[in-house]
């Protein structure tokens, strides 16, 4: 399930469970490639954050390059990766 962050608070969305947060921009080629991979992952909670619209949130989480994927468990950051990831690597990160 993919949710695009609008006016909600990210902290409220990631409070419970495991969530993959994708920091991206519409103009970013690798972001588009990662987006295609994430669209096929229906069984994962995915929150997409456009860094051009939410630069304050990107700054708060130390996002300097995109795409950046951060995995949260019960509101706590447990993994951060910068750059494209294939689906099998994303699934491995979510298992651990």
Image (cartoon, rainbow, N blue to C red):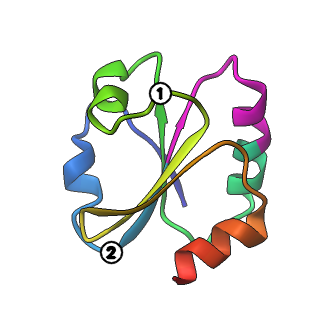
Measured as percent of width and height from the top left, residue 39 is found at 70, 54
Which residue lies most toward the bottom here? 95
Single out the mark in the foreground, 1 or 2: 1
Q: Indicate which disc residue 17 carries.
A: 2
Measured as percent of width and height from the top left, residue 96 is found at 51, 82
Q: Separation of disc 1 and disc 2 at Cα?
A: 26 Å
Q: Quadrant of the N terminus?
A: bottom right
User: Is 69 situated left or right of 7 in this image?
Assistant: right
Nearer-N-terminus badge (1/2): 2
Q: Is residue 26 magenta?
A: yes
Measuring 43% from the left and 33% from the top, which residue is drawn there? 63
Measured as percent of width and height from the top left, residue 22 is found at 53, 45
Q: Which image quarter: residue 10?
A: top left
Q: Which class describes the residues within 10 Å of circle 1: few (<14), some (14-19), or many (20+)?
A: few
> In this picture, which residue range is highlighted in magenta?
22-33
Q: Is residue 73 magenta?
A: no
Q: Which class describes the residues within 10 Å of circle 2: few (<14), some (14-19), or many (20+)?
A: few
Q: Secondary structure at mark 2?
A: loop
Residue indicated by mark 1: 64
């Amino acid at each position: 399930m993919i949710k695009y962050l609008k006016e909600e608070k990210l902290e409220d969305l990631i409070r419970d469970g495991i969530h993959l947060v994708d920091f991206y921009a519409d103009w970013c080629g690798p972001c588009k490639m990662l987006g295609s991979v994430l669209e096929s992952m229906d069984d994962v909670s995915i929150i997409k954050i456009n860094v051009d619209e939410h630069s304050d949130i990107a700054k708060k989480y130390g996002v300097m390059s995109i795409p950046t994927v951060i995995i949260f468990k019960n509101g706590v950051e447990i993994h951060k990766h910068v750059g494209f990831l294939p689906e099998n690597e994303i699934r491995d990160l979510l298992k651990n």
